[in-house]
Amino acid sequence: MVALVGGQSLPNLLPVRHYHPESTLLIYSKRTQGVYERLKAVLQQETQVYGLETDAYDIPDIVEKFNEVLESPPLAAHPLLVNLTGGTKPMSLAAYQVAQQRNAPMIYLESERKRIFMYHYTWAGQELQSASPEMLAEYIRLQDFFDVQLGVNKWSQQHPPSNDGGYFELALADALRSHGYEIMTSVKAMGSQVDIDIAVCYENQFGILEAKLGKQGKNLHGIQQLSTNGQFLGIYTRRFYVITVNSSYSHEEISKAANIQIISLPGYDEQTHTLSEDDVKTFIEEIDKAFKE
């Protein structure tokens, strides 16, 4: 399999999990070298990984280097499947050209909806033919997600702190877990520059939650933290700001601009560290809308 490395890792990881290729060639540029290295660290346990650095925009240069590596051992002996999903548009055009020259099948992974679909393309002479898209059944868990986004052994999961805020995080995590979501709490990386209260996963969809109690929920620090975390976790990672006070006009405007969803749970009891039945219902309904509906 040939895959083009862009800013998102899942379009490269999921097809390998689906097809189980004997070897995988990852084509990357200087800008995406870090993504390539994280992908390689994860994929090398499943497939023989080769890397090819090319220019991100020079199509003839990409085609030339692409063909050179395909004609050299050991890749020359393998049939070819080209994943067009990642990389820059010129990289995709170059890969398309090479696939056409070699009559090689191509795939494209659509991951913008709540289900992930694989599109298949084959050649009949010089004519392109497509089959019905296939919904993928393979799922990536949170550990895989953080390994490819942050780096293998570059992040850690800790228990929430034993304070009021930590108890609130645990109450939210328990509610999510009891409704079929995979969760992790207190995920940290890069010297706590990445500091995630709760991470949630459902069928190849991922989200992060920042939880704030009382007056802390009134300020904008949590929204800023979500924005920082989101820079390292990809544009399709959903972000939620969960607070125990009513959201303000400032909250709403900034959250819209930053694509962050605010969930207000005013019935949380700080004495018993429990969510009210209404708050659990509201919380899960909002999460379900984001991941399931």
Image (spheres, grey):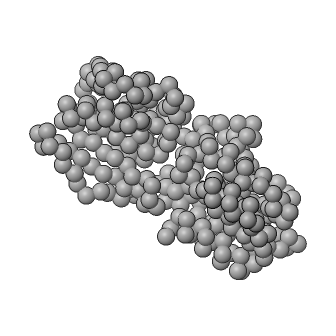
Q: Is residue 43 above or below residue 176?
A: above
Where is residue 284 shown, x and y percent of the image? 62, 72
Query: Residue 217 is drawn in which quadrant?
Result: bottom right
Residue 153 in sight: yes
Which of 47/246 is in front?
246
148 sits to left or right of 217: left
Which of 246/202 is in front?
246
Q: Is residue 81 above or below residue 195?
A: above
**On-image quarter of the N terminus:** top left
Q: In percent of the image, x 26 and y 21: which residue is there?
A: 71
Q: Is residue 184 above or below residue 58?
A: below
Query: Residue 11 is drawn in which quadrant?
Result: top left
Which of 94/250 is in front?
250
Which of 239/270 is in front?
239
Q: Residue furthest left?
A: 125
Where is residue 228 shown, x and y percent of the image? 68, 45
200 sits to left or right of 168: left
Where is residue 132 shown, x and y percent of the image? 25, 58
Where is residue 23 shown, x and y percent of the image? 36, 33
Q: In percent of the image, x 72 and y 70: which residue is there?
A: 264
Q: In percent of the image, x 27 and y 36: which residue is there?
A: 96
187 sits to left or right of 94: right
